[in-house]
Amino acid sequence: MVVELISVGTELLLGNIVNTNAAYLSRKCAILGLSMYHQSVVGDNEERLSDTLRTALDRSDVVILSGGLGPTKDDLTKEIAAEVLEMPLVEDSHSRKRIEEYFKNSQFKIITDNNWKQAMVPEGSIVIDNQNGTAPGIIMEKNGKSVILLPGPPNELVPMFENDIFPYLNKLQPETISSSMVKICGLGESYVETQIADLIEKQSNPTIATYAKTGEVHLRVTAKASDEKEAKKLIKPMVKELKNRFGNNIYTTDEAVSLEETIVNLLKEKQLTLTTAESCTGGMLAARLTNVPGVSEVYKQGFVTYSNRAKRKLLDVKKNTLKDYGAVSDKTAKEMAKNGAFITGTDVCVSITGIAGPDGGTPEKPVGLVYIACCYNNRITVNEYHFKGGRAKIRENAVVRALTLLRETILEDKD
């Protein structure tokens, strides 16, 4: 069954708001096993909205429209849908009563006449109560097609979809889709794709999709089956094969789990404490780690030593090291990591120093040069990286590589 999304609102076209509804609805439709080939964004224009809906109905079984159900004149979605499907608008007494109750219990006691527009529904449609607003949702069925109208505000759309629309669509599409996200760090996208080329070539059900993230590669394994349990059975052997191929480079198969979360859990498991020492990333590594709930059990201190003076004063980096090798060097990174662990009395310290640009580079030390070191039980590992891209991209890459090095160092410990 094919589904299509139409997001309505000139504010979306102008970029005034981010279209989070489309991302949410796409994920939910995928879970339901619905095929989606097109999405559209159309402004508050009668002719263009009508053309967009007619086109969608020609090629899709289900069309979901979000936005344009409010009380103002530019809220046209319901009126256009009723016209296209030739289902005249009639007043729904139940919706009118709910609108009255909503205003009665809100801070806005006066109901202006334009609000009654929201009580008008296409004749013969299924009306969905809005538990968080005034505009009801609507399901219109005609000629084997379904048109679903949802309010635009996410706090209204999401609960309405979860409680009412998801079950409705699930009945239309008995198959379900389940997926597992295999997250890989420490390997490049091209290498990962090469290693799974044979699996992709032979894939049918389940399938593998590759997503390149900053410093990571994510592989989504997706299966379609009669129910979620059966779909997960199909996924399991594929995930097992990926684990055989990529080993410890896979840090999780849970879509909700981040790299930093796995590291915090690893530190807790091994009862280790951590310090960070950053220069060019300016605390970004510490911020990633402290986003994880419960990190205070293992994360003790973070240093942001942007200047040479700070490196000397806070981390005891030797004056001669900075003079002879420079702040961006493997020697400085090593001293930052070693001294950071010693000063704070922690088991592990990871350090970052580099040139994020756009200025400051030289032929010998270009923009993007970053050294990352990890000191663990007085053993120090340091890696040199040459990142491409702008300042933000270089810093983000450095943080992910630091997390990866930290994880690898702990996993390599045999004690």
Image: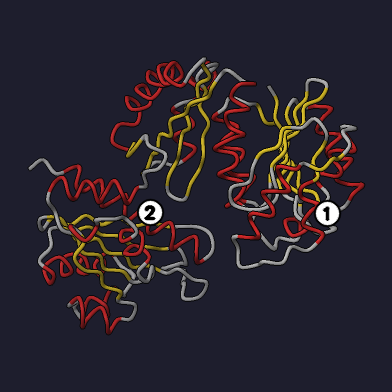
Quick check: can you spot residue 36?
Answer: yes
- Describe residue 154's horizontal placement relative to residue 275 as left or right: right
Quick check: can you spot residue 39?
Answer: no
As helix, strand or loop, the secondary structure at mark 2 comes to helix
- Describe residue 140's horizontal placement relative to residue 264 as left or right: right
Quick one: label 2, few (<14), some, or many (20+) residues within 10 Å? many
Against 407, residue 367 (above or below) is below
> Can you give x and y, in whole percent of width and height, for residue 42 in the image?
80, 49
> Can you give x and y, in whole percent of width and height, for residue 325 in the image?
28, 73
Q: Residue 346 occupies which quadrant of the picture? A: bottom left
- Describe residue 185's horizontal placement relative to residue 136 as left or right: left
> Can you give x and y, in whole percent of width and height, for residue 163 in the image?
55, 37
> Can you give x and y, in whole percent of width and height, for residue 50 in the image?
88, 42
Task: Name the image quarter holding the N terminus.
Answer: top right
Against 229, residue 79 (above or below) is below
Q: Nearer the viewer, residue 299 or 18?
A: 18
Residue under the point 19% across and 47% down: 410
Q: What residue type is labelled 1?
A: Asp
Mark 1 or 2: in front is: 1
Residue under the point 42% across and 19% down: 229
Q: Which amino acid does label 2 sit on?
A: Val
Quick one: label 1, few (<14), some, or many (20+) residues within 10 Å? some
The mark nearer the N terminus, 1 or 2, is 1
As helix, strand or loop, the secondary structure at mark 1 comes to loop
Q: Name the residue under label 2.
A: 400
Q: Name the residue under label 1.
A: 44
The label on residue 115 is none
Direction right: furthest residue = 47
Q: Which of 145 and 349 is in front in this view?
A: 145
Q: How far apart are marks 1 and 2 (CA)?
A: 42 Å
